Image (cartoon, coloured by chain):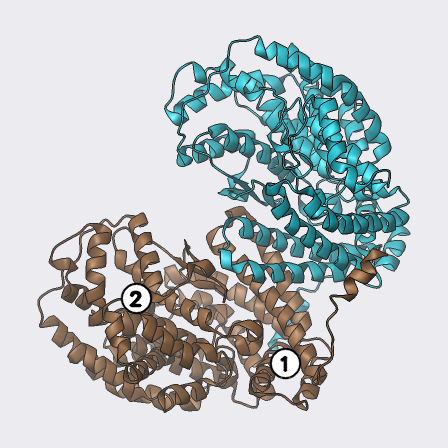
Chain colours: A cyan, B brown
Amino acid sequence: MVYRSLTRRYQVSPMSTNPAYATLEARFRKMNSVAEALSVLSWDMATMMPEGAAEMRAEQVATLRGINHEQITAPDMGELLDRAAAEPLDAWQAANLREMRRDWIHASALPADLVEAQARAESACEMVWRQARPAGDFKAVLPALKVLLGLVREVGHVKAEALGVSIYDALLDQYEPLGRAAEIDPVFDHLETFLPGFIGEVLDAQNARPPIIEPDGPFATDRQKALGIRLMEVLGFDFRHGRLDVSHHPFCGGYPGDIRVTTRYNEDDFASAMMGVLHETGHALYEFGLPSGHWRPQPVGRARGMVVHESQSLLMEMQVCRSKEFAGFLSPLLKSTFGAEGPAWEPDNIYRRGIKVSRGFIRVEADEVTYPAHVIIRYRLEKALIEGRMELEDLPAAWNEGYQRLLGITPPDDRLGCLQDIHWYGGAWGYFPTYTLGAMTAAQLFDAACHADPAVMKGLAGGDFRPLLGWLRANVHSKGSLLSTRQLMTQATARPLDPTVFETHLRRRYLG
Amino acid sequence: MVYRSLTRRYQVSPMSTNPAYATLEARFRKMNSVAEALSVLSWDMATMMPEGAAEMRAEQVATLRGINHEQITAPDMGELLDRAAAEPLDAWQAANLREMRRDWIHASALPADLVEAQARAESACEMVWRQARPAGDFKAVLPALKVLLGLVREVGHVKAEALGVSIYDALLDQYEPLGRAAEIDPVFDHLETFLPGFIGEVLDAQNARPPIIEPDGPFATDRQKALGIRLMEVLGFDFRHGRLDVSHHPFCGGYPGDIRVTTRYNEDDFASAMMGVLHETGHALYEFGLPSGHWRPQPVGRARGMVVHESQSLLMEMQVCRSKEFAGFLSPLLKSTFGAEGPAWEPDNIYRRGIKVSRGFIRVEADEVTYPAHVIIRYRLEKALIEGRMELEDLPAAWNEGYQRLLGITPPDDRLGCLQDIHWYGGAWGYFPTYTLGAMTAAQLFDAACHADPAVMKGLAGGDFRPLLGWLRANVHSKGSLLSTRQLMTQATARPLDPTVFETHLRRRYLG
C-alpha cells in the first residue's frame, strides 16, 4: 500500500477561523473555473467553431450553466452566507461575501419556471425580431415583445423584493451593481439640457472648416492586423496572456490571464477595425489589471460592472486614441503600415476624421457627441415601459419624438428606429444607460489621471502608455469589486460622477 | 403570472417504462456534454491558448473532470445500474447499460487516495523523464518509475478484482474494452515468428532496386495546408463539422459533430504533414460515422476502443494511402500543388518512397513492416513488469536484447532505447499492444471491404472514397460500442482477428 504513505505528506490542514466563509470561497472558485471554461466555449463559438456544431455547443453551454446554477442555488447556500457574515472577515473578505450574496440573490430569487419562461421568450422574441428588423415591421414583433416585457417586469418585480429596490433598479443591478435610476436621472437631465444646442454648435464649427480628406484604400487585412497588434502592444496588451482573432461581432472575451480580443476587417476602411481593437483593448487592460492571486477566481476579483468596464474601453478609444496627442503618434505609424503618404495621413486630418460629428439614426454608428442622445432616449423609454407608464404600442411614436427632440431628426421607418438594437428583443432591459455612464466615467477618470500625473499626457504623445496604465491599475483595475462604482469614483477622482467633467471634455475637444 | 401558462405548454411527460435506465441516460448525457467541453479546452490548449494561461487551464480541466467524477461515482449509481438491468431494454439500451457499468467500475473501483497518488506519481515521473530522456539516464528516472509502477500495479489489482480479470487485462481494459492478453499472445507469437526473417527479405528486395528519388523542397506551408485540406475532402472529411489546425503533436480531437484535426508542417518534407493528416483523418472519419441522434451522447455511441480507432487511422494511412492505386491518384495532385515535375513525382517513385523499410531504434519513425516489432518488445516487457516476473532494473538490458532479437540492432543508449516513449513514464501501461492490433485489424477490415465490393479499390484509384467509406460506416463506424471488438470483427470480416491477413498484406505489398 505505497500510496497511503505518499498521500499523507500532501494533506493540507482544513483548520480555519472562518469555516463557512472558507467553504464559500472553495465553491465560488469552482464556479469560476466553470465560468472560465464557458468563456473559452463562447470565444471558440464566435471565432473557430465549424458552423455545423452549433446545436451541440448550445447543449454544452446549457449543461455548464446548469452546473453553476445548481452550485449557486445549493440548499445550504443561504445559511452559509448568513454564518459567514458572523465570522471575522477583513475588508476584502467582507466585500467578497457581499458579492457572493449578490450573485446568490440574482440566481436564487427567481422560481425555476420563471427563468425557463424568460429564456424561452427571449429566444422567441429575438427570432421574430431578426425577421422584423430588416422589414421595419414593429407590429410583427409586438406580440412576442409583449410576452417578453411581461416576463422581464415579473423578473424585475421578484428581484426588486429580494434586493429592496425598485423594479427598474433591480434590472439595472444585473449589469451595474448598485446602479440606481435616482442617480442616473439628474446626470442624464444635465446632458439632455445641454446636448441639443451643443450638437448644433459643433456641426456649425466643423462645417466651417475645410473638408476632411479620406485616405485611399484598399487596406490589406494582414497590414491592418499587424497595425492592430502593434497598437495593442503599445497600449500594454500582454500577448503571453491573450490573442487577437476575427469574429463577426468584435468583442473582448476570455478571462484575466487569457484575454481573447476579436475584430473584423474592412479593406475599404482601416479605421473601423483599428478603433474597434483600441476599444476592446481598453476592456482587456481592465481584465488584465484585476486582482491576481487569491482574489482572481473570487467574486470580489471580478470587474466592477458594466459602467466601469465600458469606461475603460471608452477611456482608451475616445479619451486617448481620438486625442490630438495620439493622432500625432498615429500618423507616422499609419504611413509606414500602409506605405502611404499625403495630406490624408497628416496628424490634423487623422484627428479631425476621428472626431467627426453627424446626426444619425443608428446608435452603433454614432460619434462621441451624439451617442448620449441615443442612450438617453432609450433609457427614458425603457424605464417608462418597465414602470408601466407607457404601452409598447406607443413605442415607435415615442421613439421618433425623442429623436426629433434630442437630435433634430425623425427616423423614416422603425428599421432605423426602435427596431435597430437587439437589447430589448433579447431581454436586456436596464442595460442601455451603462454606455453613457461609461463614457462620462471615462472622461472623469482620464481627467483625474492627467491631473494626478503630468507624465500621463506627455507619455501618450510618444506612444508611452505606462504612466496612464499605472494610474488606472492603482485606482481602478486592482480594486476589482472591492468598492461600489460610486465609492471607486469618489476615491479615484475625489467626487462621484459629475456630468460637468464630460461636458467640459466635449466643449474643449469640439469647440475649443 | 403570465409565465405559468407559458411553461405548461412545453412540459414533457416523464413517463417511461424503465425509469432507472432513463435516469442513467439523462446523467450520462450531461457527463458527455462536460466531456465535450473538455475536448474543446484540450484542443484550444494545444492550438490557440497563449502560453501564460496554462495554470488556469489546468484548474478548469481539473474542475470539469472532478464534476464528471462526482457524477459517475454518485452514491446511488450502483443501485441505479442494478435496477436498470432488471428493466425491459432493447439491444442498444442493453449495450449502453453495459458500457455505463464499465465506466462506473473504472471510475469507482479505486479509492480516492489511490487516484490522487497515481496522478501525482504520473506527473512526478513524467517530469523526471523529460530530463532523463535527452541525457539517456535511465537510472535517474528509475526511483520515480518504481513508485509509479507500484501504483499502476495497485490500480490494476483493484480493477482486476472489480472486473474479474488479470491485472494486465484490467489495465488493458482501460484502453481496449474486453481486450485480453490471452487473445493477444498467439497473434503476437505469430508475428514474432515471421517478422525477423521477413524484414531481412524485404530489405534485400528493396536494396536490389534503383534508389528512390527524393523530391526537391522547400514545400511552402500554405501549399501543404491546401494539399491537406484537399485530401481530407477527398477522404470524406466534412468541414462543416470540423477544422484543420496546427499543433506541436498532431492529433484528432473534438467530438462527433465538431472534429478538430491538427498537423505540423516541415517545409523540407511535405510527406510528414500529409501522411499525418491522412492518419488523423482516418480517426476523424470514424468519429463522424459514429451513431448520431439519440445515441451520440451516450456511452454506446462512443468509439469502440483504441484498437478499432487505430485501425481506422491505419486503414487510411497504411492500407489505402500508401497503396499503388493511391500513388497514381496522388502524383498529379502533388505536381499541381507544388508546381513540380520530374521522376521524383511519378507514381512509382511516390509509391516506393511511401513503403520504404528500414531497421531503426525509434518506434514513431518506424515503417509498417518494422513497427510491430517495436510494439511486441514493449508488450512483452510491460506484461512481465506488471506481473512481477521482471524488475525495472533489468529493463534496459531486456529492451536491448529484444531489439537485437527482433530487429537485429542494439540501441547505443537508453535515449534511443527504453527511454524513448512517454507511455510508461506517464502511467499508460497496457496501451502499446493496441497500435499493432490496430494495424492488423486495419488490414483485415480493408481486405473484407475490398472483397465485399469491387468498387472500393476501383474508387480509390480515382480518388473516390465513397464506396470504402460506405462499407466502413455500415460495418464499423455506425456500430459505436454496440459490439465488442471481437464481435465487430466477426460480423464485419466473418472471423476474429487473424494474423495471416496482415501477413498476406505485407507479403503482397513488400515482396509481391
Picture residue at 83% right of the left edge, 44% below the top: A170
Number of residues whose C-alpha sits closer than 10 Å to that of mark 1, classed few (under 14), some (14–19) or many (20 or more): some
Where residue B471 sits: x, y (%)? 36, 78
| Placement of A490 over or under A384, stated as above or below | above
Where residue B52 sits: x, y (%)? 54, 47
**Residue A473 visible, this orientation:** no
Location of the C terminus of chain A (image quadrant): top right
Picture residue at 83% right of the left edge, 29% below the top: A185
Element assignment for label 1: loop
Q: Which of A340 and B425 lies nearest the eye of the viewer? A: A340
Number of residues whose C-alpha sits closer than 10 Å to that of mark 2, classed few (under 14), some (14–19) or many (20 or more): few
Badge number at residue B109: 1
Q: Quadrant of residue B139?
A: bottom left
Q: Which of B286 and B18 lies nearest the eye of the viewer? A: B18
Element assignment for label 2: helix
Report the residue marked by disc 2: B365
Amino acid type assigned to the residue bearing label 1 in the image: Ala
Which chain letter goes with mark 2?
A: B
Where residue B281 sits: x, y (%)? 38, 65
| Placement of A133 over or under B303, stated as above or below | above
